[in-house]
Amino acid sequence: SAVISQKPSRDICQRGTSLTIQCQVDSQVTMMFWYRQQPGQSLTLIATANQGSEATYESGFVIDKFPISRPNLTFSTLTVSNMSPEDSSIYLCSVGERVGNTEAFFGQGTRLTVV
Amino acid sequence: QKEVEQDPGPLSVPEGAIVSLNCTYSNSAFQYFMWYRQYSRKGPELLMYTYSSGNKEDGRFTAQVDKSSKYISLFIRDSQPSDSATYLCATIRSGYSTLTFGKGTMLLVSP
């Protein structure tokens, strides 16, 4: 199993600002993912963070709003840009496999409130 | 129609009860089925996964998949207050890495 440290654990931000969330894994992993968990909604994949190349975004999510970095096999960041109250959510980092991702591990999440 | 449907609950049971948590899915291409447990203010943790149809048991937990009806179940025997959490079902297509989650069911086990 992988141990995932996510920072910050929570934050309250002003609308129009940006927040960068960090995800550190205790071992090298192939796949890193970023999810959003809104109240009453399914855990939704934002993007797959690719090491050495641009992230792969899911439908409804764009790089300008959620830029992602993956400088190495143990670290990734997600930035939530130009925030609005609708961005208030829990953001989760996950690691898993490229194929047959049946044992995905999650960080503890970042609880973001935009005021 | 959502790809994975799950009743959000809450489901309240007394300690010692048998709990049944369920999901339905619509995409017949899903091959792997997972159950995650999420405590308040924590990330989801994997409980167990099954491949295709059948049962899988791990201690007090049993996962069951019926592909003919596209129905996923998690049974918890002798439920404990420490089982109080949100339970998320998830599925994945063979050869892919993208998980599709249900909304989660909140379970409350009272002493």
Image (spheres, coloured by chain):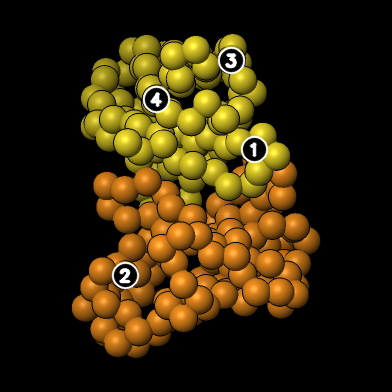
Chain colours: A orange, B yellow
* Disc 2 residue type (three-letter): Asp
- Quarter occupied by residue B26: top left
Q: Given the image, what chain letter belongs to the residue carrying mark 4?
A: B
Q: Given this view, does label 4 or label 2 mark the residue nearer the observer?
A: 4
Tell me the residue that label 4 is attached to: B24
* Disc 1 residue type (three-letter): Thr
| C-alpha distance separating marks 2 and 3 | 38 Å
Marks 1 & 3 on one chain? no
**Do the CB atoms of the residues marked 2 and 3 lie less than 8 Å apart?**
no
- Closest to the observer: B2 or B109? B2
Q: Secondary structure at mark 2?
A: helix
Which of marks 4 and 3 precedes in the sequence?
4
Tell me the residue that label 3 is attached to: B53
Q: Which mark is residue A102?
A: 1
Q: Residues within 10 Å of mark 2 (few under 14, many from 20)?
A: some
Q: Which mark is residue A87?
A: 2
Q: Position of residue A95 (x, y in %)?
A: 64, 54
- Closest to the observer: A105 or B4? B4
What residue appears at the point 68 percent right and 62 percent down from the top-left corner? A25
Marks 3 & 4 on one chain? yes
Side of B63 relative to B52 (left or right)? left
Q: Quadrant of the N terminus of chain B?
A: top left
What residue appears at the point 49 percent right and 55 percent down from the top-left corner? A45
| C-alpha distance separating marks 4 and 2 | 29 Å
